[in-house]
Image (cartoon, helix red, strand yellow):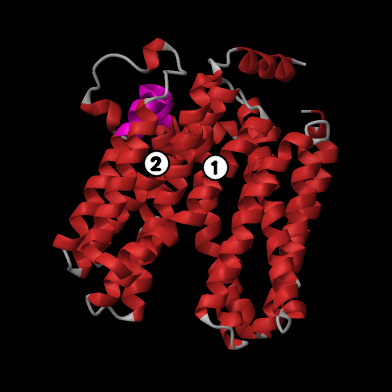
């Protein structure tokens, strides 16, 4: 009962809905920003003569600081105000992107990747925190936010590809800066959704340093059953994506599919991800917890069955699209449940905690699946990995029944 009262208080203090359009735009630009960087940095490294191993290090470096500092970044948003922290990291991302063409040395590029990866991830953490504050955990509106975010992931790579082909790499990096400027404008249009003492006053340099109390406070939130459940769902969801990004493309290339066909498959499926997020508003009367388990299990099952569809492209495209549809439904439900489970004052911290869990999944899953593929073969690797992730879903189902999370 006490937890339900807290949830009601959170929902009652929702700011005016005039903040929604700018918050949706912030989600679009923050997600698209990540896709721009994913597309252009490996191509730039190739032009500098980087070896495959060096490109791998460069791409991996982007997550390094985020894994260690995501909780700190979320705590900063709670302490200093989400809006102004987002503005700072948005500006930082744009400036760092513009610096790439002038610093074409691998060690410097690795440092740039670590910094820009952290900055761009902080803008996404900020966007998630902002939508939780603005909506008070309303799953339907968070679903709309996820839909707009997916628009960024669909069109950003296409725009960057055109820039790269028509204008060259230097202008492409300035394109990322221009994209960051659009995000800066969107965030600046959001009215303050937090208490006045969290967003005014001078900032001392000590306020910017990581604090042990931020980390201990965030990890204490994991004691709350709803928070622990959403973290486990999020970890499983990102583990599924990491398995896909690690070996699905390799598997499809082995089958003889062209890069253009594979890229089209992923872009087409991303549309269904956005549609899944929009569909959440029609599922409000159903248990959030059971929906999350069901659609996460569906996503895992469809990935695990990839070898069954591999030789028939249309079946493969259909299965992959349905998998993305399931993921699109899970994401806003996850955001909503977590937003309702904790007070407004720690929304940033809870997002930082979840992102830390996500980064862990992205780090360990490719390694685990790599060994599975080595032992069982590429096709059988999908079956084994799918079975392991479905075991986690079964454990989560038992936890929901035990802690009665379906009532939240």
Instruction: Residue at 75% x, 74% y: name it.
Output: 315
Mark 2 or mark 1: name the one nearer the start of the chain: 2
Q: Residues within 10 Å of mark 1 (few under 14, many from 20)?
A: many
Residue 5 image-quadrant placement? top right
Residue 126 got which mark?
none
Residue 209 against residue 171 in the figure, above or below:
above
> For this rendering, which residue is in front, 258 or 57?
258
Give residue 396's position: percent from left, percent from top.
77, 48
Instruction: Residue at 69% x, 34% y: name it.
Output: 226
Give residue 254's position: percent from left, percent from top.
59, 87
Query: Which residue in the protein does label 1 denote?
Result: 148
**Magenta span of residues:** 75-87
Where is the C terminus found, in terms of image quarters? top right
Q: Single out the residue that lies furthest toward the right.
A: 401
Badge 1 element = helix
Quick check: can you spot residue 236?
no
Residue 385 image-quadrant placement? bottom right
Badge 2 element = helix
Where is the N terminus found, in terms of image quarters? top right
Instruction: Residue at 48% x, 40% y: name it.
Output: 27
């Amino acid at each position: 009962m006490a937890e339900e009262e807290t949830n009601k208080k959170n929902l009652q203090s929702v700011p005016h809905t005039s903040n929604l359009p700018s918050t949706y735009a912030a989600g679009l630009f923050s997600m698209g920003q990540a896709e721009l960087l994913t597309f252009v940095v490996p191509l730039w490294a190739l032009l500098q003569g980087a070896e495959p191993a060096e490109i791998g290090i460069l791409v991996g470096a982007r997550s390094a600081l985020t894994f260690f500092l995501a909780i700190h970044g979320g705590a900063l948003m709670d302490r200093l105000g989400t809006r102004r922290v987002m503005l700072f990291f948005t500006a930082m991302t744009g400036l760092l992107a513009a610096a790439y063409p002038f610093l074409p040395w691998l060690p410097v590029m690795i440092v740039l990747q670590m910094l820009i990866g952290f900055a761009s991830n902080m803008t996404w953490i900020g966007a998630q925190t902002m939508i939780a504050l603005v909506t008070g955990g309303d799953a339907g509106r968070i679903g709309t936010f996820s839909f707009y975010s997916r628009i960024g992931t669909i069109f950003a790579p296409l725009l960057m590809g055109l820039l790269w082909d028509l204008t060259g790499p230097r202008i492409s990096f300035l394109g990322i800066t221009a994209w960051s400027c659009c995000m800066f404008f969107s965030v600046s249009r959001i009215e303050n959704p937090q208490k006045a003492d969290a967003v005014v006053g001078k900032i001392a340099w000590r306020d910017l340093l990581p604090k042990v109390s931020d980390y201990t406070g965030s990890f204490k939130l994991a004691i709350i059953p709803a928070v622990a459940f959403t973290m486990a769902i999020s970890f499983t969801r990102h583990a599924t994506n990491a398995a896909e990004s690690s070996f699905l493309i390799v598997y499809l290339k082995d089958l003889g599919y062209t890069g253009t066909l594979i890229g089209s498959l992923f872009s087409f499926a991303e549309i269904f991800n956005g549609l899944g997020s929009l569909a959440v508003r029609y599922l409000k009367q159903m248990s959030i917890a059971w929906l999350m388990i069901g659609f996460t299990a569906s996503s895992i099952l469809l990935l695990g069955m990839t070898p069954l569809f591999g030789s028939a492209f249309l079946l493969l495209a259909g299965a992959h699209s349905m998998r993305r549809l399931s993921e699109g439904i899970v994401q806003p439900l996850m955001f909503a449940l977590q937003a309702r489970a904790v007070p407004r004052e720690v929304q940033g911290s809870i997002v930082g905690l979840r992102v830390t869990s996500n980064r862990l999944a992205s780090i360990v899953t490719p390694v685990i699946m790599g060994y599975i593929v080595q032992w069982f073969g590429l096709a059988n690797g999908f079956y084994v990995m799918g079975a392991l992730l479905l075991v986690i879903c079964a454990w989560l189902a038992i936890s929901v029944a035990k802690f009665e999370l379906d009532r939240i």
